[in-house]
Image: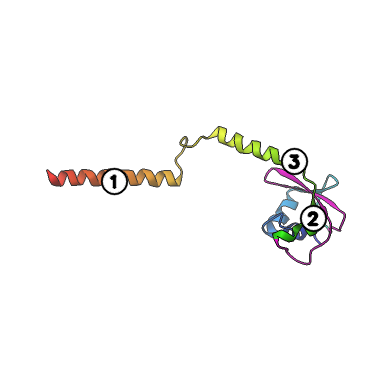
Amino acid sequence: MRVDKFLWCVRYFKTRSIATNACKQGKVKMDGTNLKPSKEVFPGDKIVARKNQVNYEIEILDLPPSRVGAKLVNLYVHDLTPKEEFEKKELLKYSQDYYRKKGTGRPTKKDRRDIDDWFEDASEETKKDEQKS
């Protein structure tokens, strides 16, 4: 089975084209060498796939006939990813919070809508006050 199809079948990537692009960008490796999307994989192979700044290390146990449900993934793949990789991901979340705290920087769409609603409410109140006068 092709490596891009395998990674899609065992749900490491949402679509096959994303898996193919990851292979082309050098994010999928076997024994330290980049894999092309068309590379055939077999049971017993160990693959390292980089996704969301985490290097997932997986060992192929068996080849699925097609895309499998999330509960059945463990029948085909053994995850060898060290816990340190997931801890790095947690640290990245905290570092992103450091750079932009809520309420600072450019307003988001939601912030913008809230500001517009506030100005509309204020203008309606002034119109009512003018009508009373």
* Secondary structure state at the residue bearing disc 3: helix
Q: Distance between the residues labelled 1 and 3?
A: 51 Å
Image quarter (top left, top right, bottom left or bottom right) of the N terminus: bottom right
Q: Are marks 2 and 3 in contact (CB under 8 Å)?
A: no
On residue 121, which mark appears? Answer: 1
Residue 118 image-quadrant placement: top left
Badge 3 local density, few (<14 within 10 Å), some, or many (20+)? few
Q: What amino acid type is highlighted by mark number 3?
A: Lys
- The Cα–Cα distance between marks 1 and 2, rounded to whole angstroms, is 57 Å
Give the residue at x 79% y 64%. 64
Residue at x 75% of width, y 52% of height = 23
Query: Could you say which is closer to the camera, residue 73 or residue 110?
Result: 73
Which numbered disc, 2 or 3, marks the residue that appears first in the sequence? 2
Tell me which residue sits at (35%, 45%) in the image. Answer: 116
The residue at which mark 3 appears reads as 83
Residue 8 magenta-highlighted: no
Residue 75 versus residue 93 in the image, above or below: below
- Location of residue 84 (image quadrant): top right
Q: What residue type is labelled 1?
A: Asp
Residue 50 is inside the magenta segment: yes
Residue 68 lies in quadrant: bottom right
| Secondary-structure class at tag 2 | strand
The magenta stretch spans which residues? Answer: 40-69
Amino acid type, mark 2? Val
Residue 83: image location, x then y, percent? 74, 41
Q: Which of 33 and 15 is in front in this view?
A: 15
Q: Which residue lies furthest to the right in this view?
A: 44
